[in-house]
Amino acid sequence: MKAFTTHRGLVGPMDRANVDTDMIIPKQFLKSIKRSGFGPNLFDELRYMDEGQPGADCSNRPVNPDFPLNFPRFKGASILLARKNFGCGSSREHAPWALEDYGFNAVIAPSYADIFYNNCFKNGLLPVILTEEQVDILFKEMDAQEGYQLSIDLPSQTVTTDSGHVFSFELDEFRKDCLLNGLDEIGLTLQNADDIKAYEADRAKQHPWVFGAIK
Amino acid sequence: MAGRTLYDKLWDSHLVKQNSDGSSLIYIDRHVIHEVTSPQAFEGLRLADRMPWRLDTNIATPDHNISTDKAERDAGVAGMADEVSRIQVQTLDDNCDLYGIKEFKINEMGQGIVHVMGPELGATMPGMTVVCGDSHTATHGALACLAHGIGTSEVEHVLATQCLVAKKMKNMRVTVDGTVGAGVTPKDVVLAIIGKIGTAGGNEHAIEFAGSVFRDMSIEGRMTVSNMAIEAGARVGMVAVDQKTIDYCEGRQFVPKAEMWNQAVEYWRTLTSDADAVFDTEVVLHGDDIAPQVTWGTSPEMVAPVTASVPTLDEQPNEEQRKGLERALEYMGLEGGQAIESISVDRVFIGSCTNSRIEDMRAAAAVAKGRSVASSVKQVLIVPGSQMVKAQAEQEGLDKIFIDAGMDWREPGCSMCLAMNADKLGAGEHCASTSNRNFEGRQGNGGRTHLMSPAMAAAAAVAGHIVDVRTFVGGAE
């Protein structure tokens, strides 16, 4: 997995609450059997004027001029600034895949849906949690200043603005460690193979019906 | 020591290892697999040169993007018209064949929507941890399981290790006491809960549904409720074991038999929260207060009793909510203050992992019987949740009732709940739907979804607009 340590980049907005994963990547693109290539269809229904089809070239599709991420000033954004409960709805990991493939390295929001939040860490995408007031400040600064950039530092767990704000954020130690080091979580778990086998042997004795029924 | 909640007990009994960094290794008993979120996980296994940890834990079936049209289904995977979908379903078949994973293939008895299939085959049993690359895995919690959705990376993790790295959630109890009135169904109860706590109300929590309303409910009804825990933000929803749970499981294909059955039942009966268990968050509703519910907006929390009106901008407490409401009303093509019952419907969908079980089919048929679909309604799709539900419904003659009423009786699958196949809404069309999400574009680009119960959806099909099933069924047609 891709590691994340520090990042400085252009901020782009998604200024609404409860952005769901159907909005992030609509269902027709879930038919792909690949992990990559979802970026051109990120926010497809908001971003384009026509209906997107899987596998179709997006370069000549009519774009929605009112959708902020289409504004020239947000071109190349790598930090998505969003509102509360971002990523609610389905478990599709295609949502972080699409954000990452589009070019985002981090999302900043007051809260996330649990499954989406978890999925981000598997893909080198950092979901930063700040308070609603802090997110409001960032939206205001971004609106006021073209080319607005932020610096995110994972080791110190801070978001720093050029105006001098330093906002701290919380995250679990395990997730931080995996992201900082780009660790293979499956490999880590398999280091506990003996523990898993011991648990399994014990469980097979106590609850034998859990094993063997499905063949 | 304080007593433990059901969730605490399920967590404790699956804890393989507690790590010093606060994370835990949790053992997974049952892994349910479908075509959409698994191909990249199997590919990941191959790239890392790994094999599945255990085979007898996995159960697979295609459901999300298969056709519900009989002629296309009869042609099997090879006959799937959408080539991209066909490759995905074929990939599931190939992966299951390659690794020796039990799969109920596209037209095999046993196939169905993953969350209908697992419980009805007895692959889901009380006390298990159940995961699937689908957020509605919470459904299985109706059988007192710790069940939740996972992403594709975790699908690969479970395949490779039989474990997940997890952090314990907080405990929430939603108590609904009293009794619900006639015409008020499990769907209405869970929509009322979501209306009360909001779509983020259950974030970071596992919800236990408790109280007389859930005790009185069938297991199918409890599945409808647990299914939509995720729409309240909770990955996990569950109901404690009682005699109904045991009776539901008995005799199903994969449950233990004879002496092992008795041993299992003895354990299952312990799967309740202790009387002195403490919950981090408590929510209380009264069953007698709940009316049939309908969503009018673009989030499941935008819900109201059928007798109410669409909210107005003036009622909103702040600018953010005003903006959200304005956007939702514009998308839905509705006016603030408009009566919910004045909303016309273009299509009706009765199905999905929320409401496609036999009692849902019966409830819809009871309303449809002897009536006809309104001429203004373009299509009414009735999509049973599984081959077994379909067979049972046909044995009871429900298919005839639907067909006589002018409705389409379809083959099992997820269908118009998420519109990955050909079943979808056109732009601007309103749909009375028994599914679980009314997000923008969910049922088709520009489509407008109104979530409700199967009986309410059937009544809307007949009336041509949203209608209170309580007065409709008793009153004049």
Image (cartoon, coloured by chain):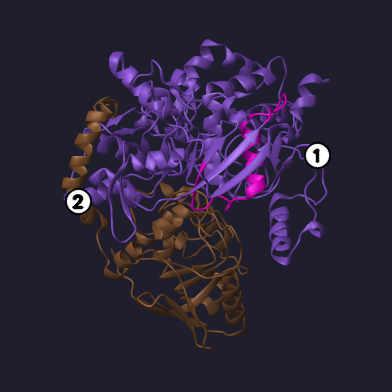
Q: Name the residue rendered at 40%, 51% in the picture.
A: B168
Tell me where residue B175 sits by quadrant.
Answer: top right
Where's residue B242, x and y in %? 49, 24
Q: Which residue is drawn at 31% across and 15% down?
A: B257
* Residue under the point 63% across and 24% down: B407
Closest to the observer: B103 or A206? A206
The residue segment tinted magenta is B178-207
The magenta stretch spans residue A38? no
* Rendered view: B8 above or below A170: above
Q: Is residue B183 magenta?
A: yes
Which chain identifier belongs to the brown chain? A
Residue at position x 38%, y 53% in the image: B167
Q: Where is residue A193 in the image (x, y as percent from the top left)?
A: 18, 47
Image mark for residue B342: 1
Q: Name the residue under label 2.
A: A192
Badge 2 amino acid: Asn
- Residue A104 in view, yes or no: no
Q: Nearer the viewer, residue B428 or B210?
A: B210
Q: The purple chain is which one?
A: B
**Chain where mark 2 sits:** A
